[in-house]
Image (cartoon, rainbow, N blue to C red):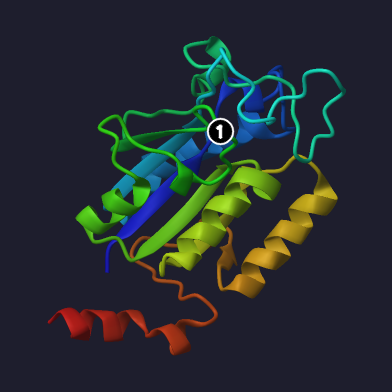
Amino acid sequence: MSRALFIIDVQNDFTEGGALAVEGGAAVAAGITAYLAEHAERYDLVVASRDWHNPDDHNDGHFATDAEPDFVSTWPKHCMADTPGAEYHPALDTSGVHVHIRKGQGVPAYSIFEGTDDSGASISEVLERHGITDIDIAGIATDYCVRASALDAIEHGRHVRVLRDLIAGVATETSDAAIAELGHAGAAIVESSELPPGEVVESPDADAAGSPADDEAGRA
């Protein structure tokens, strides 16, 4: 079994003071840095995503133009390519990140699976290349890009854990609903502090999907 950490959209525009600020975003950035500093050995691969929107278009209606944004499907302009708002939050140490994914280039994109790395490879191709079977997810925002990325990871057959103390959402109600949805879909919702090095936490449907021991036996 090989495990990856997804760090979703920990960017200046999604943290306090940004164009689309999420309360607690800066704390998430610092928390992920501290977590990786102590537990980098848990991961075979660390992937970070960023919204990276083209300033020359409206991303197929993703940005509100003639009307106020509804903050559900239309948003203020944010994370414009090559601007400070699109950069990682300064409290996030990216020195341990192996792969950087950019998404939302010309089209709305919430999931990391809708982006590509610097070579143009999709995250699916990256995961296959590294033999990743299990994914931990942290970042912003719980109710949008974290949710979408976790659901897609499950859809792609990975065992998923959401690190609840290392995420922040736009709104409490929608974030709670997202966590409930992810748990129902098969993700394990865990606190990072509860995971000692080397521990494997199986998804709730692990028996149906095959246990990690079964995976190891199948590759022997």
169 left or right of 108? right
Residue drawn at point x = 53 percent, y = 51 percent: 149
Tell me residue 166's x, y (percent): 58, 46
Q: Quadrant of residue 60?
A: top right
Q: Residue at x 46, y 88 (%)?
A: 208
Q: Could you tell me how many numbered marks the image carries?
A: 1
Quadrant location of the C terminus in the rendered image: bottom left
- Secondary-structure class at tag 1: loop
Q: Quadrant of residue 4?
A: bottom left
Q: Is residue 41 visible?
A: no
Q: Tell which residue pokes out farthest to the left in this image.
A: 220
The residue drawn where x is 23% and y is 61% is 131
Answer yes or no: is residue 158 visible: yes
Position of 31 relative to 135 (above/below): above
User: Is residue 144 rendered to the left or right of residue 71?
Assistant: left
Mark 1 Cα-neighbour bin, 10 Å: few <14, some 14–19, many ≥20: some
Residue 216 is situated, as x and y percent measured from the top left of the image, at 22, 80
Indicate the position of residue 91 as horizontal and vertical percent values: 51, 24
**What type is the residue that disc 1 sits on?**
Val
101 in relation to 45, above or below: above
Does residue 120 sit above or below 152 in this rendering?
Answer: above
Front-most of residues 129 and 108: 108
Placement of 219 over or under 33, stated as above or below = below
What residue is pinned by disc 1?
A: 107
The quadrant the N terminus occupies is: bottom left
Occupied quadrant, residue 69: top right
Q: Position of residue 177 (x, y in %)?
A: 77, 60
